[in-house]
């Protein structure tokens, strides 16, 4: 498999804007940055909020770009006006455009001015935001001040979640030079909802460094089920626990390990006790990616029972599925957003209706009882990952998108 690319990196630095960086669950951003750096693309990383994580992935140490924390509260000593004056010295017309912008908040303006100053000082030619929420809000305003384009990768929650405060997606989508999203499902939704055409809207799957995810055939004799993710409603772990009860009542011998942490942990633990599943379901907290990979190598099935939560939150295309399929671990998942593009039922995994513990239990039982099927799914899944989810190839496509964006950009006076 050819993982090399001759794509020419855009001249100048790309500024990555994130609400929080790093985040334990957002390895896809780190993979993307590492691939860009390996290709010689200068990257600057900006975090709008302090990281609130207690654990970090080991691959973070390989990122060469520093992380600049953009202050979100000015000091009561005139700091806001100092920032305003410095930005005005660089971009007088840009600051005037910002001040004429309707419905902006003080905090967003303060962060956008700081970011615009960094754009000037570091030779940044394009801002790229991950998630179409506050990161895109600030990137859009900073780009307006600096007279450079911005692009955004929209995932899932930022598209579908019912936020209490408006996220003004129509304006963000209209003003973005490029909108990238992580599934064809999302692409169709964005095109239909915001009128984006193919010149400004691209589907680009999250990618993996496949050298770190060597394929191995699945174990022939196993009853071990693995689930990995944040312990929140959209991950559907409560449905998985119900499915484990169904399997127990059917006399199916199976063990399930859930890796992760989150707000639903107490409720899930209580559910395990209420179902009398302490002997077959265990929760072991978060762990580094290298340890998760080891668990995947020893498991028989990965269960990813995603659902649409009551507030509209949902997963777009969970990275854990891509990782498991790359390693050769057979997967069972659900028909949420773009998952069927990855877990093609009966071809690369089993994909069932979301929120149905009986159907999920049936799929798990089917896979546990059919070693030949697990072998077939494992091989075809790996082939799909190599075709569509290899990070160097996908990051090269993204740099081409960046380069086209810059070629088309008409700098503001």
Image (spheres, rainbow, N blue to C red):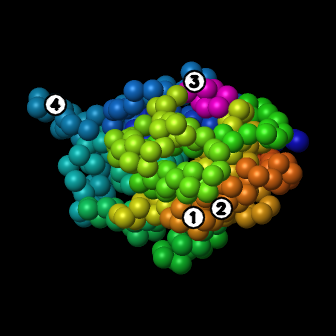
Pointer 2: what residue? Answer: 362
Coordinates of residue 240 in the picture (x, y in percent): 53, 53
Q: For marks 1 and 4, give the one nearer the viewer.
A: 1
Q: Is residue 289 magenta?
A: yes
Pointer 4: what residue? Answer: 75
Pointer 1: what residue? Answer: 358
Q: Are marks 3 and 1 in contact (CB under 8 Å)?
A: no
Q: Are marks 1 and 4 in contact (CB under 8 Å)?
A: no
Q: Which residues are magenta?
A: 288-295
Q: For marks 1 and 2, give the CA distance.
A: 6 Å
Coordinates of residue 4 in the picture (x, y in percent): 82, 38
Quarter of the figure with the C terminus = bottom left
Q: For marks 1 and 4, give the CA distance.
A: 56 Å
Pointer 3: what residue? Answer: 58
Q: Nearer the viewer, residue 162 or 286?
A: 286
Coordinates of residue 188 in the picture (x, y in percent): 59, 73
Q: Are marks 1 and 2 in contact (CB under 8 Å)?
A: yes
């Amino acid at each position: 498999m050819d993982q090399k690319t001759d794509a020419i990196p855009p001249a100048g630095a790309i500024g990555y804007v994130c609400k929080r960086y790093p985040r334990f669950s957002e390895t896809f951003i780190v993979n993307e940055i590492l691939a860009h750096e390996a290709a010689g693309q200068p990257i600057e990383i900006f975090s709008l909020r302090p990281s609130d994580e207690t654990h970090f992935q080991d691959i973070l140490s390989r990122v060469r770009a520093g992380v600049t924390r953009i202050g979100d509260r000015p000091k009561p000593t005139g700091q806001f006006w100092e920032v305003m004056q410095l930005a005005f010295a660089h971009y007088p017309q840009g600051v005037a455009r910002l001040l004429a912008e309707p419905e902006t908040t003080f905090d967003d303006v303060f962060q956008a001015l700081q970011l615009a100053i960094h754009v000037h000082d570091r030779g940044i030619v394009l801002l790229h935001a991950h998630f179409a929420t506050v990161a895109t809000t600030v990137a859009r305003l900073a780009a307006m001040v600096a007279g450079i384009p911005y692009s955004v990768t929209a995932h899932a929650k930022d598209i579908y979640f019912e936020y209490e405060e408006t996220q003004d997606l129509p304006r963000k989508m209209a003003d973005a030079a490029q909108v990238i999203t992580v599934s064809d499902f999302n692409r169709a939704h964005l095109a239909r909802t915001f009128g984006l055409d193919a010149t400004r809207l691209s589907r680009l799957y999250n990618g993996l460094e496949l050298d770190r995810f060597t394929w191995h055939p699945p174990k022939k004799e196993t009853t071990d089920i693995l689930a990995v993710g944040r312990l929140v409603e959209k991950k559907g772990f409560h449905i998985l626990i119900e499915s484990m009860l169904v399997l127990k009542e059917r006399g199916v011998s199976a063990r399930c390990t859930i890796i992760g942490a989150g707000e639903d942990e107490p409720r899930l633990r209580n559910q395990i006790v209420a179902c009398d599943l302490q002997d077959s379901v265990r929760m072991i907290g978060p762990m580094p990616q290298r340890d998760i990979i080891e668990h995947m190598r020893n498991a028989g099935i990965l269960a990813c029972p995603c659902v649409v939560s009551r507030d509209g939150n949902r997963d777009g295309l969970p990275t854990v599925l891509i990782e498991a399929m790359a390693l050769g671990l057979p997967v069972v998942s659900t028909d949420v957003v773009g998952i069927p593009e990855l877990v093609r039922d009966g071809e690369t995994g089993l994909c069932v209706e979301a929120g149905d513990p009986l159907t999920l239990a049936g799929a798990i039982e089917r896979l546990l009882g059919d070693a030949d099927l697990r072998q077939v799914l494992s091989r075809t899944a790996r082939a799909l990952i190599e075709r569509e989810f290899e990070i160097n190839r996908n990051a090269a496509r993204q740099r081409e998108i960046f380069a086209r964006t810059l070629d088309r950009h008409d700098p503001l006076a």
